[in-house]
Image (tube, grey):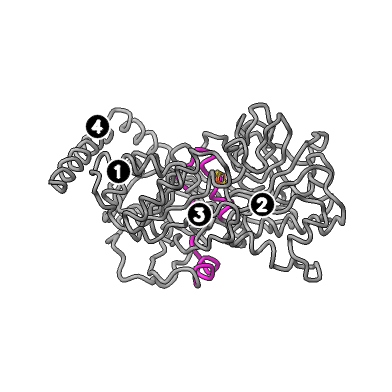
Amino acid sequence: MASAAIASSSSSFINQRRNDVGLSSFSPNTSFYLSNAKKKMVSKNIVSVMAPQSQRTPSTTGSVKTGMTMTEKILARASEKPQLSPGENVWVNVDILMTHDVCGPGSIGIFKKEFGQNAKVWDREKLVIIPDHYIFTKDERANRNVDILRDFCNEQNIKYFYDINDLGNFKANPDYKGVCHVALAQEGHCRPGEVLLGTDSHTCTAGAFGQFATGIGNTDAGFVLGTGKLLLKVPPTLRFVMDGEMPDYLLAKDLILQIIGEISVSGATYKSMEFVGSTVESLSMEERMTLCNMVVEAGGKNGVIPADATTYKYLEDKTSLPYEALYSDEKARFLSEYRFDISKLEPLVAKPHSPDNRALARECKDVKIDRVYIGSCTGGKTEDFLAAAKVFLASGKKVKVPTFLVPATQKVWMDVYSLPVPGSGGKTCSQIFEEAGCDTPASPSCGACLGGPKDTYARMNEAQVCVSTTNRNFPGRMGHKEGQIYLASPYTAAASALTGYVTDPREFLQ
Ligand code: SF4
């Protein structure tokens, strides 16, 4: 009885989605879009990236007739098609689905409604559930969301549920991780060539691993929970070639603020953003994650960076699953190509209230600030705290405004308290932060990146001016609607904390 109900419910849902495919595949808008895109497509001389030895048995993509971009090839593999072009709608097999405490309950509700109360998820080992957003709060609705996730994971025997029970001491919860996008990487769920979907717009962060990663809504997630598949339109690709030695006062945050400032917050709408070039190759995995994290701030569908030795090194102790990295063909067609000489770039900020409101940090030196926030999936990783500590160490001074530190995950928090900061004689970040007068590093979570309930640590409850290593500066994003957020790198954030004004980090790093 139950299974008949499930079959009937799920097939009507699937049929509805298939009808959706028919409608959207052949709509006049799509034809216009395709012909327009074809007209614009240009072949470029691209940087040739050698594909390493495959670690997976023969490619499932078949013989390639026309050059494809990395994103097209990944989606071709996932949809078991030999060839794909931008604008095509394809059913892809999902390798990993991630959800969290904000969108998980809604996705679960849709799954149960459409597939039946007793339905089982398509694969208990491919679903990763990470409470991270509204965790350290007394807000009952927020707490209830985590309870819903826990009940569902118990019911479905989900393998990867990073639970938290004791809110008073996060260290008493060994399973608890923290911010989903950082935890996904640290726990080995990001693998080259795969498709990772998540109910969070910054799921694009995982493109740093040479995979297709994008955010989806609760309805789509409910469908993936039941089937392991999703209908996706293949995006065209914009290519960003960054060459030149990265000056030691810049971080990946400056690179992505430069790009978003260049193309605007709608410049990559439903497009893939592929990052290549000698500068990108020189970046660590965490810095590559920062770069890909903010592609959605330009409207990007996904961001990708070709996997290389740095990627494989990072993955060495994180996953034992086989994967196959895929790379853009030499004859791949890109919608546009942008080139940057990074050696000439200066530290940047995005002024209120848009991530594309780019300015040089030094141009904003008269902007008085009330606080600094270092945290989030963009700027709360281990290397972000090491970068901030480097500035505090170089200055030897104390901060002039409240400076809040929110490690993204439990692992980052432990690094902050244990890793020696280079050139410090063995001091940890936490020691340097304490000497500089910063607030004690908080429990790992999304924290005040998106405001959250009123009692969220470091939430902007007043109309203040904040320099933040986060990714969004829309009105109200960190709490107060009249708050002003300057997005910046951890270097610039730390330098600004030391002066009480938006400050170019070269003031302390040179
Ligand atoms: S840290 Fe901020 S941007 Fe990242 S997932 Fe959490 S709320 Fe979203």
Viewer-nearest of discs 2 and 3: 3
> In the rendered structure, are the residues bearing label 2 and label 1 in contact, judged by CB atoms less than 8 Å apart?
no
Residue to which mark 4 is pinned: 23
Viewer-nearest of discs 2 and 1: 2
Residue to which mark 1 is pinned: 111
Q: CA distance from mark 4 to mark 3?
A: 46 Å
Residue to which mark 3 is pinned: 165
Nearest the viewer among 71 and 401 is 401
Q: Earlier in the sequence, mark 2 or mark 3?
A: 3
Q: CA distance from mark 2 to mark 3?
A: 17 Å
Callout 3 crowding tier (Cα within 10 Å): few <14, some 14–19, many ≥20: some
Q: CA distance from mark 1 to mark 3?
A: 25 Å
Across and down, in percent, residue 234 comes to: 36, 44
- What is the magenta range? 289-316
Callout 2 amino acid: Ala
Q: Earlier in the sequence, mark 1 or mark 3?
A: 1
Callout 3 amino acid: Asn
Secondary structure beneath label 1: helix
Across and down, in percent, residue 163 comes to: 47, 56
Callout 1 crowding tier (Cα within 10 Å): few <14, some 14–19, many ≥20: many
Callout 4 crowding tier (Cα within 10 Å): few <14, some 14–19, many ≥20: few
Callout 2 crowding tier (Cα within 10 Å): few <14, some 14–19, many ≥20: some
Q: Earlier in the sequence, mark 4 or mark 3?
A: 4
User: Ligand 1, what quadrant?
Assistant: top right
User: Is residue 300 one of those drawn in magenta?
Assistant: yes
Task: Kindly indicate the quadrant of the structure image that contains residue 193.
Answer: bottom left
> Does residue 494 appear anywhere in the picture?
yes
Across and down, in percent, residue 472 comes to: 60, 38
Q: Residue at x 26, y 56 (%)?
A: 80
